[in-house]
Amino acid sequence: MSSDDLPPEPDDGIPPEATDADRFTNARAIRSTALFEDYTELIADLTEEFGEARITDIARRLGVTHPTANKAVLRLKREGLVISRPYRGVFLTEAGAAMAREVKARHRLVVRLLIAVGVPPEAAEMDAEGIEHYVSETTLKAFEVYLDGRQ
Amino acid sequence: MSSDDLPPEPDDGIPPEATDADRFTNARAIRSTALFEDYTELIADLTEEFGEARITDIARRLGVTHPTANKAVLRLKREGLVISRPYRGVFLTEAGAAMAREVKARHRLVVRLLIAVGVPPEAAEMDAEGIEHYVSETTLKAFEVYLDGRQ
DNA sequence: ACGGAAATGTAGCCTGTGCTATATTTCCAA
DNA sequence: TTGGAAATATAGCACAGGCTACATTTCCGT
Ligand SMILES: [Mn+2]
Ligand SMILES: [Mn+2]
Ligand SMILES: [Mn+2]
Ligand SMILES: [Mn+2]
């Protein structure tokens, strides 16, 4: 993103560990996509429930005003994640649907893992809404293995 | 924050579950403090290492430019988390130090738990940088219990 | 069929968080 | 001691993501 993906480092035998800056830069990058992930997941839910996702419903479920939801949908549109016509519902594109599926899977897995290690379901749901966005593919796989390994 | 803390709900026997909007609103609130948490934690680290935290070091470790770090420090100052004089180092106030301690404890606990369930240490460190901010007190307690309950 | 209510859109404001370019200050080595 | 390099500050731009106020469109009950 900012510097090279993984600077080769002069061959001094030291493994190219992730530096502090790498970690923070990674977290910042994720932060900027987290909102889109929540929107696509929610739009998928609403579409399943009602056949379409209306701006008002999106706004209410997210706890924001509708102008805020409307603006976000414009950004989603610009990114090719949704399509919509004025005064009509919002629908996911293939890319948007793919993101929704991916996020939903992550969401469920995080909740399951939290509950498995003893977190009360209510707290697990609450915390997962933020955590889900920061769980890497590697970590996700580890969660799966852990959850499978205890039937 | 936005509406009441927990609306009592007309006494219909239904337990006042956290609604979707509550979860998203919670996540948004946390998102706005996550940056401060990272700064205070980092300033504590630098102060321990070098006796003070210089803007340049803060910026480098976070992977941002120094004007960005400088502006953030102004906000931290306004919030009473740090003190600093122009062209000098940045120091935590008591409130800032308290936040740093709290965040660092959370950070370590999250990393430990991730590793305990099988996440590779490298990935655990990376993901924890984002996850740490979204782990509630309840979840943290559960992590402690889980980690203690295995030797 | 139509008129008011509900939904949606738009304008415009604010703050946060990033950046580059430039000015100022401090520090250090000759 | 002093001049250039390094560090820090400031100005100003951009965009995200909140909000309120107001305009427009759609929907629905009479
Ligand atoms: Mn979420
Ligand atoms: Mn989610
Ligand atoms: Mn962090
Ligand atoms: Mn941290």
Image: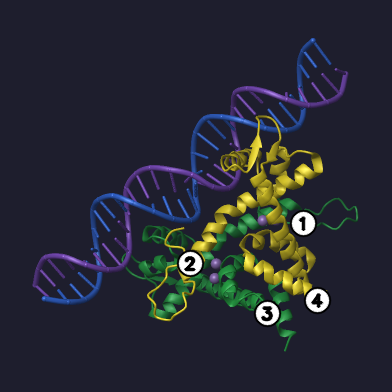
Chain colours: A yellow, B green, C blue, D purple
Give me the chain letter of mark 3.
B
Which of the two discs, 3 and 1, labels the residue nearer the N terminus?
1
- Give the Cα separation between the discs numbered 2 and 4: 34 Å
Compared to A49, does B101 lie above or below? below
User: Is the Cβ of the residue at disc 3 closer than 8 Å to that at disc 2?
Assistant: no
Of B51 and A95, which appears nearest the observer?
A95
Q: Which mark is residue A150?
A: 4
The yes-or-no answer for disc 2 within 8 Å of ligand 3 is no
Residue at image mark 3: B116
**Where the C terminus of chain A falls, by quadrant?**
bottom right
Residue A22 location (% of width, % of height): 48, 67
Of B147 and A49, which appears nearest the observer?
A49
- What residue sits 56% from the left and 57% below the top? A31
Residue at image mark 2: A22
Quadrant of residue D5 within the rendered picture:
bottom left
Which of the two discs, 2 and 4, labels the residue nearer the N terminus?
2
The picture quadrant for ligand 1 comes to bottom right
Q: For the residues carrying marks 3 and 1, which lies nearer the camera in this image?
A: 3
Q: Amino acid at mark 3?
A: Ala
